[in-house]
Image (spheres, rainbow, N blue to C red):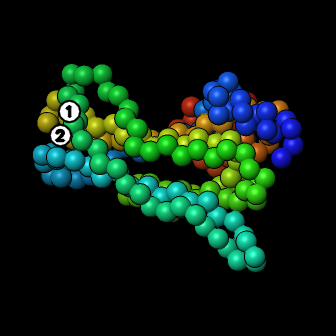
Amino acid sequence: MVQWQVARLQRIVSGEEQWELIGSRTYKWHGPEALRCKHWDKVAVRWHLSTCGHRHGRRHCNGGTNADLARDPQSHRELPRWRNAFTYAQLPNPEHKDEHLRLALDGYDKKMLNVKLIAPLKIDVDWKWTIGEDGCNNFSVRMSAMSTIDDHRLADLTEFCRSFDTDGFVSCNNL
């Protein structure tokens, strides 16, 4: 690894590098009222995340589907807060430069999102669950992508943002 890459990796690990939001996608569950207004003990939050590349002339993927259980909904009188289900981090590694990231939230995404893997990259999967004044469940899941902003990576960051972001909190043209 080149000396500047090692130094940068050390800054990332030590927390000196600032992570910047490069895209987010929020999904609100819109199920039938009869189901939304029943009592729930817990909610399964499922996601799929894998990295895929080519090794020895064959496609090779690492990762898969995982889940977390959301518990303890908040009352409509409380300030809603996001709770973390999962965090994925990809540090710079020259062996991963041609890989792609495949991800989806089960039950929300119609198809798997496939984006070029950038590094460093951090993806958080968070959930928010409140019981409304009507006694019905309101449940949302959010995926947020973060990276460090470097001038020599702006084209890759912009491409990732355009593929990943659906919330519009980030101006992909102004990273």
Residue drawn at the location 29% of the way across and 44% of the way down: 70
- Quadrant where the C terminus is found in the figure: top right
Tell me which corner region of the image, top left, top right, bottom left or bottom right, holds residue 120: top right
- CA–CA distance in space, label 2 to label 1: 5 Å
Can residue 171 be seen at all in this image of the molecule?
Answer: no
Q: Residues within 10 Å of mark 2 (few under 14, many from 20)?
A: some
Q: Is 38 or 40 nearer to us in this picture?
A: 40
Q: Are the residues tagged 2 and 1 within 8 Å (C-beta)? A: yes
Is disc 1 placed on a helix, strand or loop? loop
User: What amino acid type is highlighted by mark number 1?
Assistant: Gly
Q: Which mark is residue 136?
A: 2
Q: Is 37 or 16 nearer to us in this picture?
A: 16
Residue drawn at the location 64% of the way across and 28% of the way down: 14
As displayed, is residue 64 above or below residue 21? below
- Number of labels in the image equals 2
Relative to 73, 107 lies left or right: right
Could you tell me residue 1's position as x and y percent?
83, 47
* Residue extending furthest toward the bottom: 57
Relative to 74, 29 lies left or right: right
Could you tell me residue 117's position as x and y percent?
68, 52
Residue drawn at the location 23% of the way across and 31% of the way down: 74
Q: Is 18 or 127 nearer to us in this picture?
A: 18
Could you tell me residue 27's position as x and y percent?
41, 45
User: What amino acid type is highlighted by mark number 2?
Assistant: Cys
Could you tell me residue 169's position as x and y percent?
56, 31
Q: Residue 132 carries which label?
A: 1
